[in-house]
Amino acid sequence: MPVLHSQFSGEGKTKDGQVVKVAPAIVLVQRGPVFQVTIAVADQVAAELIKQGKTVQPAISGLALIDTGASVTCVDDETAQKLQLPIIDVVRMASASHASHQANVYPIKVTITGLPIGINAPRAVGAALKTQGLIALLGRDILMHCTMHYNGVAGEITLAI
Amino acid sequence: MAEPLAEERKFFSEHQSEWKEAHAGKFVLVKGKELVGTFNRAEDAIAEGARRFGKEPFLVRSVDQEKDIYIPALALGILNARSSQPV
């Protein structure tokens, strides 16, 4: 079973401008469990497009945040458009602060850098994530294929597929 | 610009009750006002949709789908909330 072990690291500045290392546990608190990933057209769509001689856009790299509170994976809308993903549904996204809004659904494939296996998320929901520096929120539909160990004390995440 | 899959979603709503009885637990593939097929897995419906329609939008939905999607971090707008940094 392939395993990816990641310890978070970061630097900060003191009031007098001196650069200091920040404890991994604090970096993990501030950034959350993020991983470098690539988002691509889902395998079943890519295979059909290739058969038809159509262009399949290359995968796009970026950061994804693991979100155990999300039942489904979300993909950045702009990323989905660049990949020319077909829209396969439109859903209502509930919101606490305003009326629920509509979101497109796309078939994507997520590959976590450092792990050799990609996971298809056939119903990833589009959301404006780029402003958060993310291209995806990895929900429980992806996590159902993984074993994850969150070590908050050490500022480490271990993920196995 | 027209809403994506507006015609397909309307067609789905009109037929969901009958499809729930006739195709319980399945995923439907709909294009325009046509039920293209029913499938056991969403992946199979998507593959058939891509084979027929390429990159064009097509509807793939469980006949049992009812509720809204709820992503707490997005719904509550707390992706980057920092209670330690009050405004």
Image (tube, coloured by chain):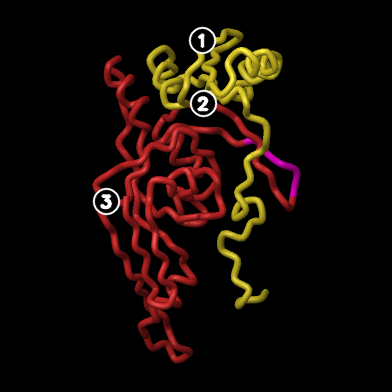
Chain colours: A red, B yellow
The kind of residue tagged 1 is: Val
- Which chain is disc 3 placed on? A
- Residue bearing the label numbered 3: A115
Query: Residue A23 appears in which quarter of the rendering?
Result: bottom left
Give the total of numbered labels: 3
Q: Main secondary structure of the magenta part?
A: loop
Which residue is identified by label 1? B36
Please state which of residues B41 and A41 is positioned toward the viewer in this rendering. B41
State whether residue A30 is above or below residue A125. below
Chain letter for mark 1: B
Q: Is residue B86 left or right of residue B26?
A: right
> From the viewer's perspective, is residue A139 above or below residue A20?
above
| Front in this rendered view, residue A56 or A28 | A28
Q: Dot 1: few (<14), some (14–19), or many (≥20) neighbours within 10 Å?
A: some
Q: Position of residue A144 (x, y in %)?
A: 43, 46
Please give the chain letter of the residue carrying mark 2. Answer: A
Image quadrant where residue A46 sits: top left
Element type where label 1 sits in the image = strand
Q: Position of residue A50 (x, y in %)?
A: 28, 21
Marks 3 and 2 close (CB-CB < 8 Å): no
Q: Which residue is mark 2?
A: A88
| Tag 2: amino acid | Ile
Which is more foreground, mark 1 or mark 2? 1
Task: Tell me residue A69's x, y (percent).
Answer: 56, 54
Helix, strand or loop at label 2? It is loop
Callout 3 secondary element = loop
Q: Which residues are magenta?
A: A98-102
| Inter-mark Cα distance, 1 to 2 | 14 Å
